[in-house]
Image (spheres, rainbow, N blue to C red):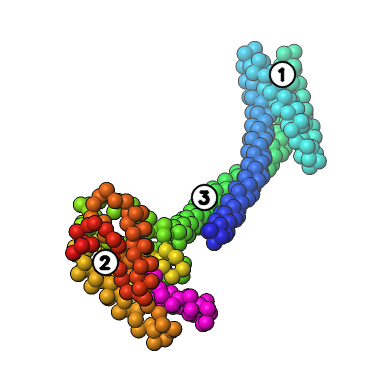
């Protein structure tokens, strides 16, 4: 029982350690996943912000170009249809500049936006001036302003600076996307590795638990065997003998014939114990058990039921001649022990049940009584006093 409890305790601790490792790995992966998710979210925000900045930069440039195109169309045609696109282009450019100013915080970016703002103002002032001159009928003055190319220089600088801002934002967006891709791939590999590790740990835990279960089963089987076996001789004990008798209690027809009980006592055992010691007495009992077991039949049951007492249940013996032959074999098997120990021998009491009405417990009592008669007579074997035909044969 103690071994089984220790085995269960050891395997329980081992299983708990494995499950603790699994939980720790899962927690660590969960924490790492949170950090990775936050990093990916930051990368996505960076990409979105970079995309928004690129969109705002393109909107600024598009607004200026629309205003410039509308200004040229108005100067060439004098049509009022160009004035609304001109005003909407100006408004778009100024709004985009304001959004960029609010979005870009670094000093270098703010300086670039300041230069873009100055050039944008110069360009839009030029466009506005030429339109106002055309409205006043001063077309030639408006064209002289156009021919100065001051607006072209401002526009070129705006394009160049916007291109630089857009390129910087694009670089940041590409870097964020690359980092996001790497993190997602690493997270995928990490989770794949986690699944493999958890599966391996669970397989190991299952193997350990199965081994522990087998150990418990084996221990239980050992305990069960020990409960029905004599610890000294390995023979069936009284409990196993009772089980055997229960199997035979239905009568001769089920047992394959009559049932004979031999109650065997080892004569001289007390003297061996007193003069040679209990260790020698135990050795004698083991030797006697081996000798008796060697001469019993395959269907017989030999049990140790007391200190120096044995019971042999022998079904199917038909007459006294067969029983006497068995008893003589038992006596002959033990007789050589007298050469090694103090004079020892056997006293055997015999009782046979032919009628199903007699209990097997009563059968053993009759055999026990017959054994004492044999013992008082100096050993050998005696049949119990019964009215059965076998006893009178």
The answer to whether mark 1 and mark 2 are in CB contact below 8 A is no
Work out which residue is located at the far bottom of the displayed protein and give it. Answer: 339
Residue with the mark numbered 3: 195
In percent of width and height, residue 165 lies at 70, 39
Taking depth in this image into account, of 112 and 29 the one nearest to the observer is 29
Residue 131 circle label: 1
Whether 125 is drawn above or below 293: the answer is above
Residue 135 in which image quadrant: top right
* Stretch in magenta: 264-290
Q: Give SS at disc 1.
A: helix
In percent of width and height, residue 313 lies at 31, 62
Residue 286 shows in the view: no
Q: Residue at x 27, y 48 (%)?
A: 357
Question: Magenta span has 186?
Answer: no
Q: Residue at x 28, y 72 (%)?
A: 327
Whether 94 is drawn above or below 111: the answer is above
Please, what is the dominant secondary structure of the magenta stretch? helix
């Amino acid at each position: 029982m103690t071994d089984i409890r220790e085995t269960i305790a050891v395997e329980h601790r081992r299983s708990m350690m494995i499950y603790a490792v699994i939980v720790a790995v899962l927690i660590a992966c969960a924490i790492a996943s949170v950090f990775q998710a936050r990093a990916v979210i930051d990368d996505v925000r960076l990409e979105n912000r970079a995309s928004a900045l690129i969109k705002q930069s393109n909107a600024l440039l598009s607004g200026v170009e629309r205003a410039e195109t509308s200004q040229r169309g108005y100067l060439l045609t004098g049509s009022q249809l160009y004035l609304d696109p001109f005003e909407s282009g100006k408004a778009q450019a100024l709004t985009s500049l304001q959004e960029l100013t609010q979005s870009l915080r670094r000093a270098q970016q703010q300086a670039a936006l300041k230069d873009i703002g100055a050039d944008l103002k110069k360009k839009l002032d030029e466009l506005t001036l030429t339109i106002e001159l055309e409205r006043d009928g001063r077309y030639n003055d408006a064209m002289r302003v156009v021919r100065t190319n001051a607006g072209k220089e401002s526009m070129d600088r705006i394009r160049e600076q916007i291109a630089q801002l857009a390129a910087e934002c694009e670089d940041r967006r590409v870097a964020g996307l690359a980092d996001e891709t790497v993190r997602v791939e690493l997270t995928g590999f990490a989770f794949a590795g986690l699944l493999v590790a958890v599966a391996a740990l669970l397989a190991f835990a299952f193997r350990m638990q199965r081994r522990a279960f087998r150990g418990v089963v084996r221990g239980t089987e050992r305990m069960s065997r020990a409960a029905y076996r004599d610890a000294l001789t390995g023979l069936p004990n009284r409990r196993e003998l009772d089980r055997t008798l229960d199997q035979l209690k239905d009568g001769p027809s089920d047992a394959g014939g009559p049932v004979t009980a031999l109650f065997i006592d080892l004569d001289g055992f007390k003297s061996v114990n007193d003069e040679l010691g209990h260790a020698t007495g135990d050795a004698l009992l083991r030797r006697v058990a081996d000798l008796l077991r060697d001469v019993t039949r395959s269907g017989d049951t030999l049990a140790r039921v007391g200190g120096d007492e044995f019971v042999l249940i022998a079904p199917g013996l038909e007459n006294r001649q067969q029983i006497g032959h068995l008893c003589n074999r038992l006596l002959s098997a033990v007789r050589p022990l007298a050469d090694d120990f103090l004079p020892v021998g056997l006293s055997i009491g015999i009782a046979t049940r032919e009628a199903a009405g007699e209990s097997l417990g009563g059968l053993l009592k009759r055999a026990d009584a017959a054994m004492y008669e044999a013992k008082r007579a100096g050993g050998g074997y005696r049949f119990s006093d019964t009215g059965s035909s076998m006893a009178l044969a």
